[in-house]
């Protein structure tokens, strides 16, 4: 029996949401949220949940169903077993959510300097590199660092239209042809793309490259629990079965119709009231756990791309969304709490803590001549970081800045799976409360087309004319 | 002759500031800044510059004079030569600006995976680790990763009162006593602290530990060009003489009384008009150069801690400051430009580019069956990232979001020195325009004292009473 199949273990590993410092009181009225505010929202949430269930049944919300794919898990595990013997480096070529998902899982569930560990310490799993950037120096340095003969590249693009990822793929394919070694070029590639359409699918069919499917999800931001995130996770030895079990456990909790028993509904309602109604413009996600920093970057993108929208479903201009800020406590607490404490900024903070870290580090006695430091001795680094977290939350609360606290009992695949699913569903439900479609992606094409036009791509010449007034530069404004 | 002593090389390496997309026109009036706005500010800036010169002469602004310390440079280089033979790992124990400075210089001026390179590839210089976080798991993993017998720890704290750094020091000192090896415990430590005061100075005196001085700078945020940043930089082989030469070159340019010839004065004036007067609440720093991401994190903290202030010099409540956001182009451009393009957010963007990357990566032909991709062939990854940068700036400009573009001819110690000095001085001057003291640090003590009180430190018991209303938690708000 796996540990997550034991109900008492699963209960012990239950993620907890603490809304006390979101509420008024203790926060000043107007700053915090009252129980009455929440009661008022309850019928709308019930209706949204009903719609959600019918959309789920109709297969319109694949991000809710990806955790229920035992077949995919077995397929991925089989693939990893097949290549593990020779792969020393696994390189993800992908942009946006695709890249952030792999990095979030690796940071959360493997040791911090995984790539510096010996192969034995890595239990034979390869080092992981995520090549999101198209900086030529960064990409070149990576290609020089890895021995291509022992390197496997995962190419991730749903539409196969992302210029950066495709360019990286073309550069890598060319190098693989000239690398030497006794494996076919196609063995060094694994493609994750649309099940049917797109040019990457042609490559799977034509060149015999291994392939995994991206379900019909919007952008890459809801794809972390699909093959997009699961393949790299399994590749570096993360227990993806436990990860998905955690996600399913959160899904079960989030089907509850009562707001105060449903973490995603409660999180969405609080975020909607704090940000949507009270017009807070910043959403800070701040774990006091090093391992969760990558999940912060992933969530920032999920939140802003889903909820930053100019018009609602009826086409009315509403301009929703917050600027996402990821920070790491206790390291960044002083700079991140400065604007709300002293400056003008108003934000909603989500803190993430753990009940227990893996290690306990007692602070030894200072001894003479530094008696002043003996106040720290007898405590541990664990107590110190916990008191920093609480102090930050309290100082924010007193000036009327609400914060939500998510606590994981420990960091492991089961609790991380819960957290990821919770954040996805909360984002989706918050979009429904805002009356927008959080699965849409407006405003992206314009920038993409302009970049193509500036690159001189055929068929895009005309689009550049609109920008003429901004393209003229006056040399007196350049120093 | 060093290359930076050659005037024609120095001229070629001159950092450039492009303010075209800050101005109206081309931006809409109200969104951009007019020449008249700047002219109006000019007399105030002249007066500020005069005051700056007299403060500099009186030794009140050490961040301006740190680049002029040939003695310190020689002392650091001598120290590095002395330990280089045996040090395999150099670990910085420091918080805030101290930690960010070391990381910024390492990321900017060494290859991206420096710690993964062999000792030969690192030219015999040690691996660098920056232990800013006090997460027990993160710190424990680091201490297990490095061989203590070959590890040197730099302890950075001006006041020796930072609980996190001191706790790390006590843990490390205890481990060093039990490590084995044939070097004295004191040889594994180098302390950077106040020249006279504080408990760390006592350790230098009492235990014979090597020590460097932190000049009287506020917090750690202005300390990157002092021993705080120079020692770790020299330790990993960065040419600190060239770095300081770049800083001095920028200092020379920034003494010009004409706004349009003085990068720091121009930058400060534009930021003041865009943020201070037009109340923009977000300051985005976004290099399209992987190597400069660490400088973004460092600058974010410099900006917010210097300018996020509740009251001005006269004690009037003004609540200045922006929430700092660091992002990396092209990777984060889509998520970072979403709130200004679609949502409500209003920010000032500073983009940083380079004229030339070190590497050039041509995009090879796609060939059949994927003719569609051939539009990319013939171009390079370099052209692609440059057109992404321009497209992002243009789409922002059209919706009235101003951006400043800083261009480095290349990334090297001389240009990085210019950039760091420019950002420090711009921040300082912007504070003067806001009529605040950017070297102060209000609002920090409250949080620190509360953390101590929560930890049960003697003498802090009373301060906890003020927080009672926020310490009561209702279990019905926890799910």
Image (cartoon, coloured by chain):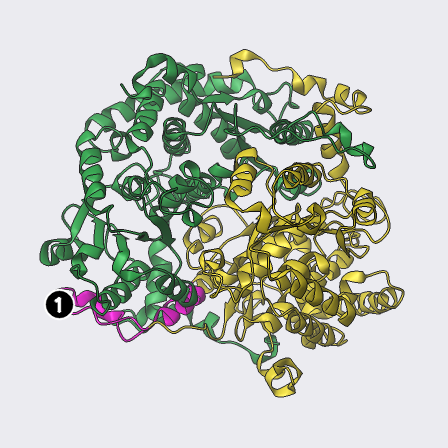
Chain colours: A yellow, B green
Crowd class of label 1 (few under 14; some 14 to 19; many from 20; radius 10 Å): few
Residue A102 visible in the picture: yes
The x and y percentages for residue A30 are: 60, 59
Magenta region includes residue A378: yes
The x and y percentages for residue A65 are: 79, 67
Magenta region includes residue B410: no
- Residue A244, picture quadrant: bottom right
Q: In this view, does B331 lie to the left or right of A68?
A: left
Chain to which mark 1 belongs: A
Residue under the image location 50 percent in, 71 percent down = A354
Foreground residue, B148 or B318?
A: B148
**Residue, far front:** A182
Residue under the image location 38 percent in, 33 percent down = B420
- Residue B221, picture quadrant: top left
The residue identified by callout 1 is A368
Q: In this view, does B466 lie to the left or right of A161?
A: left
The C terminus of chain B lies in which quarter of the figure? bottom right
Residue under the image location 71 percent in, 33 percent down = A447
Q: Is mark 1 on a helix, strand or loop?
A: loop
Residues in magenta, as a range: A362-391
Q: In this view, does B175 lie to the left or right of A359?
A: left
**Residue, far left:** B206
**Residue, far right:** A58
Residue B281 visible in the picture: no
């Amino acid at each position: 029996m796996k540990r997550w199949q034991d109900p008492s273990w699963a209960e012990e590993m239950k993620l907890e949401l603490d809304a006390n410092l979101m509420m008024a009181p203790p926060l000043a009225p107007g700053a915090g949220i009252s129980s009455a505010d929440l009661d008022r929202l309850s019928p709308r949430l019930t209706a949204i949940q009903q719609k959600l269930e019918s959309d789920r049944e109709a297969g319109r919300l694949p991000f809710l169903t990806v955790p229920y794919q035992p077949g995919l898990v077995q397929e991925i595990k089989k693939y990893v077993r097949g290549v593990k013997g020779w792969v020393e480096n696994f390189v993800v070529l992908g942009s946006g959510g695709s890249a952030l998902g792999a990095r979030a899982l690796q940071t959360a569930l493997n040791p911090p300097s995984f790539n510096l560990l010996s192969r034995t310490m890595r239990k034979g799993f390869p080092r992981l590199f995520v090549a999101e950037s198209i900086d030529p120096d960064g990409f070149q340095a990576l290609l020089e660092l890895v021995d291509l003969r022992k390197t496997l590249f995962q190419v991730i693009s749903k539409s196969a239209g992302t210029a950066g990822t495709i360019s990286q793929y073309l550069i890598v394919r060319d190098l693989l042809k000239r690398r030497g070694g006794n494996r076919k070029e196609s063995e060094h590639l694994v493609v994750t793309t649309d099940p049917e359409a797109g040019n990457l699918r042609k490559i799977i069919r034509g060149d015999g490259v291994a392939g995994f499917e991206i379900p019909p999800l919007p952008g890459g931001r809801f794809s972390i629990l699909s093959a997009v995130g699961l393949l790299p996770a399994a590749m570096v030895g993360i227990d993806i079965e436990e990860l998905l079990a955690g996600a399913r456990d959160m899904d079960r909790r989030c089907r509850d119709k009562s707001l105060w028993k449903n973490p995603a509904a409660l999180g969405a309602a609080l975020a909607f009231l704090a940000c949507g109604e009270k017009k807070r413009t910043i959403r800070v996600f701040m774990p006091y756990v090093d391992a969760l920093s990558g999940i912060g970057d992933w969530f920032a993108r999920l939140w802003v791309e889903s909820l930053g929208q100019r018009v609602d479903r009826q086409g009315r201009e509403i301009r929703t969304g917050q600027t996402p800020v990821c920070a790491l406590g206790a390291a960044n607490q002083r700079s991140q709490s400065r604007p709300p404490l002293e400056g003008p900024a108003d934000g909603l903070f989500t803190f993430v803590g753990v009940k227990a870290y893996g290690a306990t580090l007692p602070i030894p006695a200072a001894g003479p001549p530094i008696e002043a430091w003996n106040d720290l001795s007898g405590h541990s680094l664990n107590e110190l970081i916990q008191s920093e977290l609480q102090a930050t939350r309290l100082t924010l609360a007193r000036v009327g800045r609400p914060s939500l606290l998510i606590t994981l009992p420990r960091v492991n695949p089961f609790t991380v799976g819960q957290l990821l699913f919770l954040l996805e569903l909360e984002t989706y439900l918050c979009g429904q409360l805002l009356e927008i479609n959080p699965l849409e992606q407006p405003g992206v094409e314009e920038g993409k087309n302009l970049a193509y036009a500036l690159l001189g791509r055929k068929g895009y010449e005309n689009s550049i004319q609109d920008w003429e007034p901004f393209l003229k530069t006056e040399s007196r404004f350049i120093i």
